Image (cartoon, helix red, strand yellow):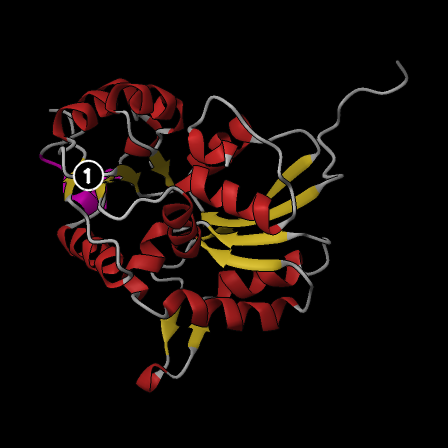
């Protein structure tokens, strides 16, 4: 054999904006990626949401990191780009996703499809025929962000049947949510307790499970949860990857990470 696999994006090259100090999004995407698709990250250190509404909600002003990343992405012949940040979508509220896509597309000046984790999630909920999800959020989401998340999905027509903020255990219970990531919790995540908590708390009225937060490690338990709960399970990174693949025209079926990736 003359050559070995080099992960060149022959079918699709996807860009994603991610939180500057997170490792989870790239790790989970690389675990799920089909052959001939590559992923490229731009890191953002701005506070959520990554684009602020202008006065009267007349469009949005992009964070400097988004502009810088878009200028770099614009020259990379990408097929799709997503803002991989659940918090920005839910705190931005209804209409934010569409406004930021329009503004970012102008900066990019390329033919790449532009989307957000919010839009990726809504597309995945529709494709999975989920109307009343059990919403699971990471422990570093404060009360305001949790409330915004519940409201965001309800405003879009997907009112959660229930919601849960993951309990990360005794080591972290006394730590305020906004201090968990700075203290290293993002690199000490355990998926077995998360599986057990979702299994125990999922209500019978939920027709699917929606795990928000692109920095929330969870794709390794999606298949097991679907087998146990007999309902589709969606996660932030899984949904963004699926939507970007479909926007790029890639129809490859991926096994092991939930039924969504086989749709």
Q: Nearer the viewer, residue 231 or 142?
A: 231
- Residue 34 horizontal/vertical position (percent): 62, 30
14 horizontally vs 87: left or right: right
Q: Does the stretch in magenta take in 255?
A: no
* Residue 64 visible, this angle: yes
- Residue 185 horizontal/vertical position (percent): 28, 32
Residue 70 appears in which quarter of the rendering?
bottom right
Image quarter of the N terminus: top right
223 horizontally vs 155: left or right: right
Q: Nearer the viewer, residue 34 or 15?
A: 34
Q: Nearer the viewer, residue 141 or 181?
A: 141
At numbered mark 1, what does the secondary structure look like: helix, strand or loop?
A: loop
Looking at this view, name the residue that lies furthest to the right: 2
Q: Does the stretch in magenta take in 179?
A: yes
The residue pinned by badge 1 equals 206
* Residue 42 visible, this angle: no
Name the residue located 65 percent from the left edge and 38 percent from the top edge: 38
Mark 1 crowdedness (10 Å alpha carbons): few <14, some 14-19, many ≥20: some
- Residue 64 horizontal/vertical position (percent): 49, 66
From this view, report whether residue 102 is shown above or below residue 194. Answer: below
Name the residue located 35 percent from the left edge and 62 percent from the top edge: 49
- Residue 54 horizontal/vertical position (percent): 37, 81
Looking at this view, name the residue that lies furthest to the front: 129
Residue 114 appears in which quarter of the rendering?
bottom right
Q: Which residues are magenta?
A: 174-180
């Amino acid at each position: 054999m003359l050559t070995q696999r080099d992960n060149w994006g022959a079918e699709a090259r996807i860009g994603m904006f991610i939180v500057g100090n997170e490792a989870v999004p790239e790790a989970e995407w690389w675990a799920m990626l089909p052959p001939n698709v590559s992923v490229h990250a731009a890191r953002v250190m701005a506070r959520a949401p990554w684009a602020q509404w202008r006065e009267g909600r007349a469009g949005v002003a992009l964070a400097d990191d988004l502009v810088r990343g878009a200028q770099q992405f614009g020259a990379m012949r990408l097929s799709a780009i997503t803002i991989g940040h659940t918090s920005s979508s839910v705190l931005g509220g209804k209409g934010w996703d569409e406004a930021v896509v329009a503004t970012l597309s102008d900066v990019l000046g390329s033919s790449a499809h532009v989307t957000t984790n919010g839009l990726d999630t809504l597309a995945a909920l529709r494709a999975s025929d989920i109307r009343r999800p059990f919403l699971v959020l990471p422990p570093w989401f404060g009360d305001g962000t949790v409330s915004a998340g519940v409201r965001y999905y309800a405003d879009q027509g997907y009112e959660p049947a229930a919601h849960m903020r993951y309990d990360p255990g005794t080591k972290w219970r006394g730590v305020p949510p906004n201090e968990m990531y700075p203290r290293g919790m993002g690199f000490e995540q355990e998926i077995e307790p998360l599986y057990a908590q979702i299994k125990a708390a999922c209500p019978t009225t939920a027709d699917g499970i929606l795990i928000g937060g692109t920095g929330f490690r969870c794709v390794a338990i999606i298949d097991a949860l679907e087998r146990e709960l007999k309902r589709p399970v969606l996660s932030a990174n899984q949904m963004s990857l699926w939507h970007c693949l479909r926007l790029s025209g890639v129809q490859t079926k991926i096994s092991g990470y939930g039924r969504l990736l086989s749709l």
